[in-house]
Amino acid sequence: MTEPLILASGSPIRAEMLRNAGISVEIMPARVDEAAIKAALGAEGAAPRDIADALAESKARRISLKNPTRLVLGADQILSVKNQILDKPVSVEEARNQLMILKDSKHDLFSAAVLFENGQPIWRHIGRATLTMRPFSDAFLEQYITEMGDDLFTTVGGYKIEQTGMQLFSAIDGDYFSILGLPLLEVLAILRRKGFGLE
């Protein structure tokens, strides 16, 4: 495969994971109305995993139609807790509220990846992880919020498990890479079959 994989996502961590694994990546973030997709599917009673899959597919399709000869990877992640879906917080107060919702409870992360070629989906996978957040103190929460700064707004739930966010948890069950936002091992397996890397 001579041309780089197109990643239809602006997520720096997804691109970093792929590049660290030796995959040549070109970033082309897809502009899709995520809120409208979530609202429509939510109104239909769609499961969180299906919403993640639909978002990933929408992104990959949009970029694939513009680049039909290239391999395009779309990805998205949904956090589900207590029968609700949390989006990336847009303020410190919203991040604080999300963390209080997650505190001392379990939540699920669904990380979907969809591969497109010639404007058509050729592969998909949804990784799942269940995380248990510990009953931290108010003092810890405020210290954490201060230390995170603008990173609070880059991920659902207001945490980065690969950084200080690990301090929030007492247990994790599932794929670490899916927590970061991409089911990497499964993605690498299909990319090898498509000519990226060695079999």
Image (cartoon, rainbow, N blue to C red):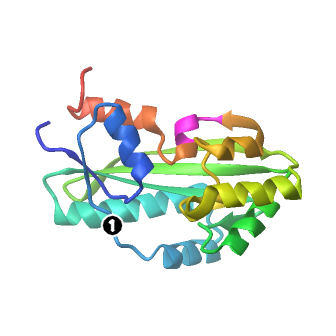
Q: Residue at x 66, y 55 (%)?
A: 147
Left or right of 68? Residue 109 is right
Q: From where the camera sits, is residue 172 visible?
A: yes
The rendered magenta stretch, by its main secondary structure, is classed as helix
Q: Residue at x 28, y 29 (%)?
A: 192
- At label 1, which amino acid type do we have? Ala
Nearer-the-camera pick, 5 or 12: 12
| Residue most extreme to the top | 199
Judging by the rendered image, the residue that carries numbered circle 1 is 30
Q: Is residue 96 above or below residue 16?
A: below
Rendered location of residue 67, percent (x, y)? 16, 60
Classify 96 as above or below 13.
Answer: below
Q: Secondary structure at mark 1?
A: loop
Q: Which residues are magenta?
A: 174-178
Within the magenta stretch, is there residue 33?
A: no
Count of numbered labels shown in the rendering: 1
